Amino acid sequence: MWEGLPFFLEVLVGGLLSGVMYSLVAIGFVLIYKSSGVFNFAQGTMLLFAALTFVSMTERQVNFWVAFSITLVIMVVMGIIIERTVMRPLANQSLLSLFMATVGLNYFLEGLAQGVWDSAVHGVDLGISNDPIFLIDKFPGLGLDIIISQFDIAAAVIAGSMILGLTLFFQYTRTGLSLRAVSDDHMAAMAVGIPLNRIWAIVWAVTGVICLIAGLLWGDRVSVSFTLTAAVLKGLPVILIGGLSSIPGAIVGGLIIGASEKLGEIYLAELFGGQGIEHWWAYTTALIFLMIRPTGIFGEKEIERV
């Protein structure tokens, strides 16, 4: 057996667990795109605002769950307000106009977060241990002498549970079926009586909730600061690989990005002059996928009739 196999598996498992967190972020992008065809450039800042709101309250001695509940309400209300005041008035404008609106929203939320709270670096403590688990001790029957972070496992379980819940919600509920109809054809959905405005408001509210959960997990891992938005933008290569409109694609893309950047950092960094390639490796992987399959793995090719 290859002597380096246990270490390879350790890196691979760590990357896959990180990939689940990328998938959660990417699903926020996918939901907005599926419902309105808009790429939400402000996703990272919404996530930062949620994490910063939560940590600022806990630092002021607000109870953990009270702070979580208040932040949850704030993010849901924020999503609805964004839909009502920014996106709905621009509903019939070009996609470029809608995209630029999210760019403006991104910088507005950055300023709002800095004005309401501050621009300092904060730490989040979710109470999840970061101690390593020796798999050979827990499951000797597997025969795998590898180490896995407890935080990575817990974060992957939380993110995975939320992804599963969202998938079931949008697969089997009336609202979810309405969203799928809206994503297929807005006009046809309106013709059968589906209220577009209500669906869009729900999607933006759900995106706010996703931003809170993802923000807390990422905040615990890398701290809460304005650099958090850069880490969250790893969701971009995820949706480019999986497909802009596919939730399963976001899951698979996240796993690919998580695993490839960790393996690349360990096994290919020397070829590129040392450590640190994981900052750009995800985008390079996405670029290669785009050259091979421009619509992503699960993306659908749009055909326009002339």
Image (spheres, rainbow, N blue to C red):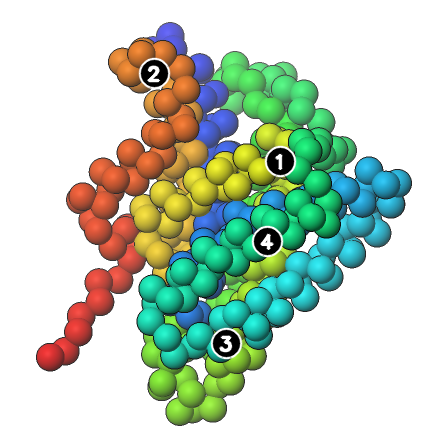
Tag 1: Cα neighbours inside 10 Å, few (<14), some, or many (≥20)?
Answer: some
Foreground: 19 or 36? 36
Instruction: Tell us which disc is closer to us: 3 or 2.
Output: 3
**In the image, 277: left or right of 177?**
left
The reply to whether dot 1 and dot 3 touch (C-beta < 8 Å) is: no
Q: Earlier in the sequence, mark 1 or mark 3?
A: 3
In this rendering, the answer to whether 146 lies above or below 64 is: above
In the rendered structure, find residue 225 and report the number of the disc placed on it. 1
Q: Secondary structure at mark 4?
A: helix
Instruction: Report x, y in % for residue 295.
Output: 25, 55
Residue occupied by mark 4: 109
Q: What's the distance in space between the residues labelled 3 and 2, CA to CA?
A: 46 Å
Instruction: Look at 46% across and 50% down and name the residue there.
Output: 26
In this rendering, the answer to whether 215 lies above or below 227 is: below
**In the image, 250: left or right of 120?**
left
Q: Earlier in the sequence, mark 3 or mark 2?
A: 3
Residue occupied by mark 3: 88
**Amino acid bearing label 1:** Ser
